[in-house]
Image (cartoon, rainbow, N blue to C red):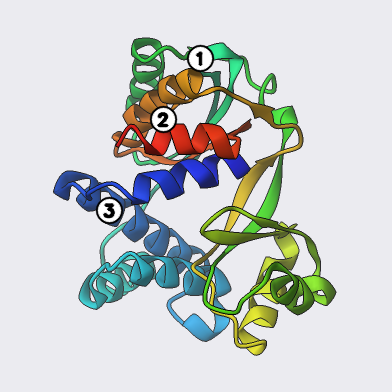
């Protein structure tokens, strides 16, 4: 997850292209719809929906779009929301492990598209279980760095709420918890007056591999291609980037 966070940070420094922004909005809206379908439209009783809405707002999704998504997902508009979650496993350049999570209304389309994008961009599909064993479902809370906020401040706030570790990811702190402890940890942050950017259940690798800049460029091209698919919701990987490699990549921009 560490490498993925640094990759995301690097990407955020680039100019936002309208088409990418639109795709990002669509995926955030899907999350809201699914959360509302699973737990109802009441934010006070649906922590998953709270996190989906917060993430959408942080990404500047308009409030009207968010409200409509909640109502659609909860069945208040008469529309039917029917998405299936599918996980594909694969390898990127130099054997970097990838989990590709799709949220789709057409499994056959999603499978064909992921397979095509992998083969065209230096990746290969893997047998079920051959990659997933190296990942565990965890809660991942991203806290933006602000003036005066230290890693110890964040750790102190979440330690008694089930946090397993807090890491410095450059421009953010990342809190890792068991998936079941994520709500308690983000609540503890709020009670300590610490704002968080996002809280998600994610797949975190138990073993990371450090990659060089050239491999990173190839991996990023593959991930970018996969993210362009409307069906691909999340991508998890086990790569890590050293500070030197990250600096080299940022100089490419």
Q: Secondary structure at mark 2?
A: helix
Rounded to the nearest angstrom, the CA distance separating label 3 from label 2 is: 18 Å
Q: Nearer the viewer, residue 219 or 130?
A: 219
- Left or right, 77 with respect to 221, comes to left
Mark count: 3
- Left or right, 120 with respect to 188, comes to left
Q: Is residue 211 above or below residue 100?
A: above
Query: At which x and y percent is residue 129?
Result: 69, 23
Q: Which residue is mark 2?
A: 223
Q: Nearer the viewer, residue 189 or 150?
A: 150
The answer to whether residue 238 is visible is yes
Instruction: Using the image, tell me which numbered label, if any, was put on residue 66.
Output: none
Q: Name which of mark 3 and mark 2 comes first in the sequence.
A: 3
Q: Are marks 3 and 1 in contact (CB under 8 Å)?
A: no
> Splitting the image into 4 quarters, where does residue 189 fall?
bottom right
**Residue that lies at the very extreme toward the left in this rendered image:** 18
Q: Which residue is mark 1?
A: 93
Q: Which residue is mark 3?
A: 26
Q: Secondary structure at mark 1?
A: helix
Residue appearing at x 33%, y 23% in the figure = 113
């Amino acid at each position: 997850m560490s490498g993925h966070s640094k990759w995301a940070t690097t990407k955020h420094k680039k100019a936002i292209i309208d088409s990418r922004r639109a795709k990002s909005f669509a995926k955030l809206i899907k999350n809201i719809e699914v959360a509302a379908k699973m737990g109802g439209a009441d934010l006070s009783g649906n922590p998953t929906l709270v996190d989906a809405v917060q993430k959408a707002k942080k990404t500047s999704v308009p409030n009207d779009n968010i409200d409509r998504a909640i109502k659609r997902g909860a069945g208040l508009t008469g529309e039917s929301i029917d998405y299936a979650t599918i996980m594909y496993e694969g390898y990127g350049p130099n054997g970097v492990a990838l989990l590709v999570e799709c949220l789709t209304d057409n499994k056959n389309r999603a499978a064909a598209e992921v397979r095509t994008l992998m083969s065209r961009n230096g990746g290969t599909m893997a047998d079920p279980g051959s990659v997933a064993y190296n990942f565990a479902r965890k809660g991942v809370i991203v806290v933006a760095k602000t003036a005066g906020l230290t890693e110890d401040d964040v750790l102190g706030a979440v330690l008694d709420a089930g946090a397993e570790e807090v890491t410095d990811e450059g421009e953010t702190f990342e809190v890792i918890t068991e998936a079941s402890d994520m709500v308690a940890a983000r609540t503890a942050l709020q009670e300590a007056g610490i704002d968080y950017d996002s809280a998600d259940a994610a797949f975190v690798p138990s073993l990371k591999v450090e990659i060089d800049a050239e491999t990173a460029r190839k991996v990023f091209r593959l991930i970018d291609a996969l993210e362009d698919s409307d069906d691909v919701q999340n991508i998890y990987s086990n790569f890590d980037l050293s500070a030197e490699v990250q600096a080299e990549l940022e100089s490419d921009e």
